[in-house]
Amino acid sequence: MRIGLLTTTAALALGLALAPALSAQTPGGGQRGPGRMQAMALQGITLTPAQQAKVDSITAKTRAQMPAMTPGTPPSDADRQKMMSLSTASLKEVRTVLTPDQQAIYDKNVAAIQEQMQQRMQGGATPATPAQPAAPAKP
């Protein structure tokens, strides 16, 4: 169970870190694959311009450190390990940019993505959706 969670977390981290580069290659802006995971992790979170600049900086730094990949060729074990390590660090760093309220939403979204990935790894078809922010109370 712990190995499965670690694998799922690593896959999520890798997907989130690679999302900007991969979605840039997808025609139409790419709301598929890892690009969709990034959007799901930040769903319901409105970043200030300063936060967005920090997230963009973290993403650019992480992307610059990633090993070069050849489309259609799986990465080596060493490259995969480096990508997972960088991605995990990037996830933690992005989380520190968020306010406590934003972190709560982010954590729920990441947990939902992990659950969905775990279901896919086990052959399940039920997709999980990230947490939606509560609707403001109407007076």
Image (cartoon, rainbow, N blue to C red):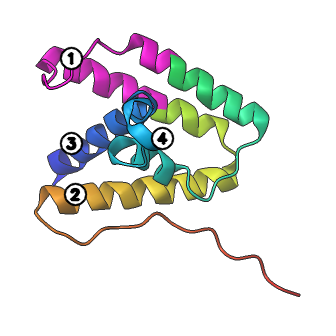
**What secondary structure predominates along the stretch shown in magenta?**
helix
Rendered position, 36 above or below 71: below
The residue indicated by pointer 2 is 118
Q: Please name the amino acid that badge 1 sits on.
A: Thr
Mark 4 nearby-residue class (10 Å; few <14, some 14–19, many ≥20):
few
Which quarter of the rendered picture does the N terminus lie within? bottom left
Distance between the alpha carbons at the discs numbered 4 and 3 = 28 Å
Which residue is pictured at 47% across the width and 57% down the height?
109
Rendered position, 120 above or below 58: below
Number of callouts: 4
The residue indicated by pointer 1 is 70
Q: Nearer the viewer, residue 135 or 93?
A: 135
Q: Earlier in the sequence, mark 3 or mark 1?
A: 3
Q: Which residues are magenta?
A: 61-90
Residue 79 in percent (x, y) is at: 21, 16
Q: Please name the amino acid that badge 3 sits on.
A: Thr
Q: Earlier in the sequence, mark 2 or mark 1?
A: 1
Rendered position, 41 above or below 60: below
Distance between the alpha carbons at the discs numbered 2 and 3 = 9 Å
57 on left or right of 31? right
Q: Earlier in the sequence, mark 4 or mark 3?
A: 3
Whether tag 2 and tag 3 are in contact, CB under 8 A, the answer is no
Quick one: SS at disc 3?
helix
62 on left or right of 4? right
Rendered position, 120 above or below 34: below
Residue 6 in percent (x, y) is at: 24, 43
Q: Is residue 121 magenta?
A: no
- Camera-side mark, 2 or 4: 4
The numbered mark at residue 7 is 3
The numbered mark at residue 29 is 4
Quick one: SS at disc 4?
helix
